[in-house]
Image (spheres, rainbow, N blue to C red):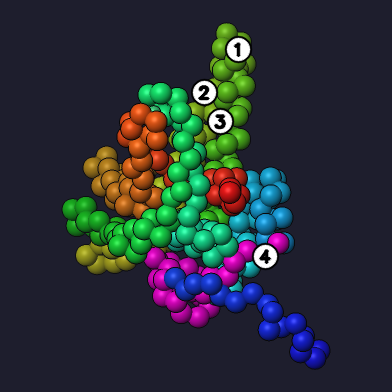
Amino acid sequence: MSQNPLQKYFRQPKLTVPLPSKGLFAPPDAISGDPSNLEVYAMTGMDEIILKTPDSLFTGESTVRVIQSCCPGIKDAWHVSAIDLDHILMSIRIATYGNLMTVEHTCGNCGTENEYDIDLRPLIDHFDRSEYKNSVQVHELTIKIRPLFYQEMTKFNLENFKIQKRLMAAAQDFDNAENQKIINDSYREIADLQNDMFLKSIESVTAPDTIVTDQKFIEEWVKNSEADLFDGIRKLIEDNKKAWKIPSVGVQCSNCGTPAELEITMDQANFFVKKS
Ligand SMILES: [Zn+2]
């Protein structure tokens, strides 16, 4: 095929960003090029349409397509690390609509509906300073963990949503014996799901004489360990979650001056709509 004469009008990269994970956890083919200089393009009209399709948002499909469209260095966005996800989505938002994002907040004191223009740059810079701690020592053992992939996160969220929905429906009629069984089963399923997520986060266990990566062995070991082991790993996972959360932004009501902390979420429904 001959070269398209319109090629020089194609979109150009708007910014380059470092991936917080440095691509360390991704499978070999998921990222191409330099993970510390990832090119980010603005969304195309097609990308915007994809993001406005609610069903595909829910399964993660549209997020994956848009990430791969705007960050060509990411070949397989299903394997984006949890610690890279917000960073990537914010970068795409900045590349498309600029640094500012309008966030609405109703004052808890006087009820005034305020609109704030939040600068996303400092929030992104926060990730560049965050550290992912990936190992913990419990007695003789060193446990290494990894952030979940987007695919795993999406799967867990979907499963969790389904169970919660069933649980809520059954809780409407608590006296029904059949519903009580559904409720009990649902709680057990939620616990199983959380355990499953916990196990997926464990990459390896190093003992003085061996290193184990087999998930089956690790699962068996976790089930036969004392609580302090579980707590040690859980604390590490929780600490990372806190370190990698988008920082809240302090604002003041325009009418009465009452301060508030804005939580910036990556709920795509809000995040990818340009408010002006
Ligand atoms: Zn107020």
Residue sitting at x 29%, y 67%: 210
Please state the quadrant of the image where ligand 1 appears: top left
Circle nearer the N terminus (3, 2): 3
Residue sitting at x 63%, y 64%: 43
Residue 42, position as x, y percentages in the image: 59, 66
Does residue 199 show up? no
Residue sitting at x 31%, y 59%: 130
Circle nearer the N terminus (4, 2): 4
Relative to residue 153, is residue 206 depicted above or below?
A: below
Instruction: Give me the disc on residue 85.
Output: none
Instruction: Give me the disc on residue 44.
Output: 4
Relative to residue 221, is residue 87 depicted above or below?
A: below
How crowded pointer 4 is (Cα within 10 Å; few <14, some 14-19, many 20+) is rated as some
Element type at mark 4: loop
Circle nearer the N terminus (1, 3): 3
Element type at mark 1: loop
Which residue is the site of mark 2? 184
Q: Are marks 1 and 3 in contact (CB under 8 Å)?
A: no
Which residue is the site of mark 3? 164
Residue 44, position as x, y percentages in the image: 67, 65
Residue 123, position as x, y percentages in the image: 38, 55
Instruction: Give me the disc on residue 173.
Output: 1
Residue 146, position as x, y percentages in the image: 39, 59
Relative to residue 156, is residue 135 depicted above or below?
A: below
The boundaries of the magenta stretch are: 18-45
Circle nearer the N terminus (3, 4): 4
Circle nearer the N terminus (2, 1): 1
Is 24 contained in the magenta span?
yes
Q: Are marks 4 and 1 in contact (CB under 8 Å)?
A: no
- Separation of marks 3 and 2 at Cα, in angstroms: 12 Å
